[in-house]
Amino acid sequence: MARLDAELLEAHSLSLAEYEVLAILSESPDERLRMSELAARLHLSPSGLTRRLDGLVRRDLIRRERCPSDRRGAYAVLTKPGRRILVHAAPTHLRGVREHFVDRLTPRQLSSLGRSLQRIRAEL
């Protein structure tokens, strides 16, 4: 994980944790999520999420929006610059995952891992 983080930082000035935020938002409807849901997906406390998002907001990679139907609620929204950096960083991330994880397993180990993950998914 440290290598993935270092590669993303070097190539895109984006940490693995920041990449994860952008990726989750990019896969969400309208590229937005309520803060509480984003915190849950990232396994962060509300204050931990705030710290993680602050830098992304300063860099205009995401923005915070108030929820019109719930004054206490807020959304994290992927911006155009955020989408652009995610598109550029994705090949670096995927190449790193392949090099540091996938390529280190035999076809038999990959098959076993796939079956195991399918079982876990089915149980959830």
Image (cartoon, rainbow, N blue to C red):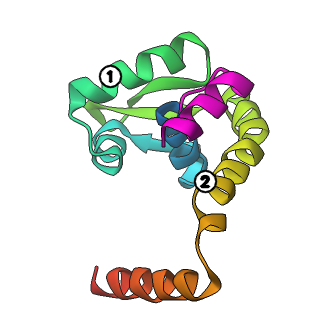
Dot 1 surroundings within 10 Å: few (below 14), some, or many (20 or more)? Answer: few
- Check disc 2 and report its element: helix, strand or loop: helix
Q: Position of residue 41 (x, y in %)?
A: 34, 50
Please state which of residues 67 and 75 is positioned toward the viewer in this rendering.
75
Residue at horizontal 37%, vertical 80%?
121
Residue at horizontal 49%, vertical 36%?
2
Nearest to N terminus: mark 2 or mark 1: 1
Where is 14 relative to 42, above or below? above
Q: Position of residue 116 (x, y in %)?
A: 40, 85
Residue at horizontal 61%, vertical 26%?
14
What residue span does the magenta drawing correspond to?
1-15
Dot 2 surroundings within 10 Å: few (below 14), some, or many (20 or more)? Answer: some
Where is 33 relative to 58, above or below? below
Residue at horizontal 71%, vertical 45%?
90
Magenta run includes residue 85: no
Please state which of residues 83 and 44 is positioned toward the viewer in this rendering.
44
Give the labeled residue for mark 1.
50
Give left or right: position of 4 versus 35. Answer: right
Magenta run includes residue 13: yes
Q: Quadrant of residue 97?
A: bottom right
Give the labeled residue for mark 2.
100
Please name the predominant secondary structure of the magenta segment in the image.
Answer: helix
Q: Nearer the viewer, mark 2 or mark 1?
A: 2
In the rendered image, the residue lying farthest to the top is 58
Mark 1 belongs to which amino acid? Thr
Give left or right: position of 49 versus 81. Answer: left
Please state which of residues 110 and 122 is positioned toward the viewer in this rendering.
110
Please state which of residues 58 and 105 is positioned toward the viewer in this rendering.
105
Q: Position of residue 8 (x, y in %)?
A: 64, 32
Mark 2 to mark 1: distance in Å? 30 Å
Asked if the residues shown at circle 2 and circle 1 are in contact, with their CB atoms under 8 angstroms apart, the answer is no
